[in-house]
């Protein structure tokens, strides 16, 4: 008996929500598994004050997917502007909203569920873990840095290895079950270390993905990211994801082959973001890792650069183009899916 397409999108920032926004035109069975180790300005203040996992990426996912009251949706993304309070200036209301719900409900998971319900999210948004842990990294010069904001800081030595501050971090309830039931599992797009691989550091998540029966696709980034991937190639991105998955379980990588217009490429190049092109050599290197490569026109070439609060902008993906490409990959694999069901 056939079922509605089940999709799991893992990541954070605006990457995973973009994938979810595109796929919700084709199915309601979508689960976002979202990173919770951000320690930036607004999120970091909430984490310190109220001892909760990072709500910022969860807030982004809920805001992008909200289909309820438009005023509430705008309010959820609103940032306070005031020169009277350094703590309140720049604070995202949605972060406070989720933290208040966590205190009221007695659970961060219940807070996320209630926020999603109140904003009319179709599908599910789940934190990757309920542990209030921090991302750390060992750098090429031997330095160890703690907290996500320092892991992504510009001007430091190259990242060699990332890890979580706390041992025995468990996956949030429902995450591994969603992965096991999914027909499609997407990783990224988004910050290689502080978003995608950070989620894979939760051992149960990495194991569940490596053992998943569904198609596992890593959506490659469009540019490098200063502070994280300055000299990292596309094949290096894929190698890192495969490494944090435990060496197996990544079926495909989806790369953009639609060249961005010169004005976009130049804008980001001036800010230290190098465009990542899927050259024949890079594709061959990825294939040698045992990962199949698919290319498609998946970027948004028409929207201009945006201002991000304390984060770097990049050439973004287009939700509709991305979902079309992913559905094409699924269609090509369907005979294999039927064979194992």
Image (cartoon, rainbow, N blue to C red):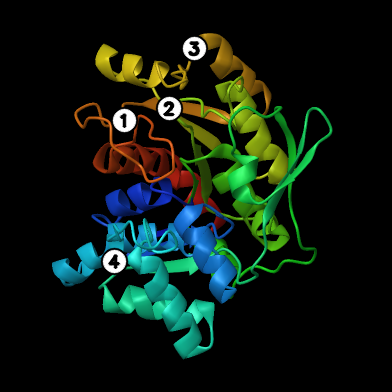
Report how far apart the C-alphas of labels 4 and 1 lie in the structure. 27 Å
Q: Earlier in the sequence, mark 1 or mark 3?
A: 3
Q: Is residue 142 above or below residue 198?
A: above
Q: Are marks 2 and 1 in contact (CB under 8 Å)?
A: yes
Choose top left, top right, bottom left or bottom right for residue 15: top left
Choose top left, top right, bottom left or bottom right for residue 155: top right
Q: Earlier in the sequence, mark 4 or mark 3?
A: 4
Per the image, the residue denoted by label 4 is 76
Per the image, the residue denoted by label 1 is 299
Q: Is residue 258 above or below residue 69?
A: above
Image quadrant holding the N terminus, namely: bottom left
Residue 133 or residue 179, whichever sits in front: 133
Report how far apart the C-alphas of labels 1 and 3 lie in the structure. 17 Å
Per the image, the residue denoted by label 3 is 279
Local crowd at mark 4 within 10 Å, few (<14), some, or many (≥20)?
many
Q: Earlier in the sequence, mark 2 or mark 4?
A: 4
- Residue 165 image offset from top left, x and y in percent: 75, 58
**SS category of the residue bearing label 4:** helix
Instruction: Answer with left or right where residue 242 lies relative to residue 73.
Output: right
Report how far apart the C-alphas of labels 2 and 1 lie in the structure. 8 Å
Report how far apart the C-alphas of labels 2 and 4 lie in the structure. 28 Å
Residue 124 or residue 178, whichever sits in front: 124
Report how far apart the C-alphas of labels 4 and 3 lie in the structure. 41 Å
Q: Are marks 4 and 1 in contact (CB under 8 Å)?
A: no
Q: Residue at x 52, y 77 (%)?
A: 108
Residue 8 seen from this side: no
């Amino acid at each position: 008996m056939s079922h509605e397409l089940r999709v799991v999108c893992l990541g954070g920032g605006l990457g995973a929500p973009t994938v979810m926004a595109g796929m919700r035109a084709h199915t309601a069975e979508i689960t976002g598994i979202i990173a919770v180790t951000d320690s930036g300005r607004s999120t970091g203040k909430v984490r310190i004050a109220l001892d909760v996992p990072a709500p910022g990426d969860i807030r982004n996912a809920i805001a992008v997917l909200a289909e309820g009251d438009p005023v509430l949706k705008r309010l959820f993304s609103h940032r306070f502007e005031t020169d009277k309070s350094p703590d309140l200036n720049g604070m995202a209301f949605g972060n406070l909203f989720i933290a208040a719900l966590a205190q009221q409900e007695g659970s961060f998971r219940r807070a996320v569920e209630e926020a999603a319900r109140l904003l009319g999210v179709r599908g599910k948004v789940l934190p990757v873990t309920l542990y209030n842990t921090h991302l750390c990294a060992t750098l090429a010069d031997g330095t160890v840095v703690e907290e996500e904001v320092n892991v992504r800081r510009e001007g430091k030595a190259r990242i060699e290895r990332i890890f979580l501050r706390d041992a025995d971090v468990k996956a949030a309830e429902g995450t591994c079950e969603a992965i096991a039931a999914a027909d499609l599992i997407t990783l990224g797009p988004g910050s290689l270390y502080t978003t995608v691989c950070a989620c894979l550091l939760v051992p149960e998540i990495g194991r569940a993905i490596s053992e998943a029966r569904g198609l596992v696709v890593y959506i490659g980034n469009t540019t490098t990211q200063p502070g994280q991937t300055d000299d990292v190639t596309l094949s290096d991105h894929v190698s890192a994801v495969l490494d944090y998955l435990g060496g197996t379980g990544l079926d495909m990588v989806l790369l953009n082959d639609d060249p961005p217009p010169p004005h976009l490429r130049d804008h980001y190049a001036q800010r230290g973001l190098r465009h990542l092109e899927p050259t024949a050599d890079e594709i061959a290197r990825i294939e040698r890792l045992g990962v199949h490569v698919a290319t498609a026109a998946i970027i948004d070439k028409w929207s201009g650069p945006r201002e991000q609060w304390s984060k770097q902008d990049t050439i973004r993906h287009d939700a509709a183009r991305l979902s079309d490409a992913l559905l094409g990959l699924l269609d090509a694999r369907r005979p294999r899916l039927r064979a194992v069901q």
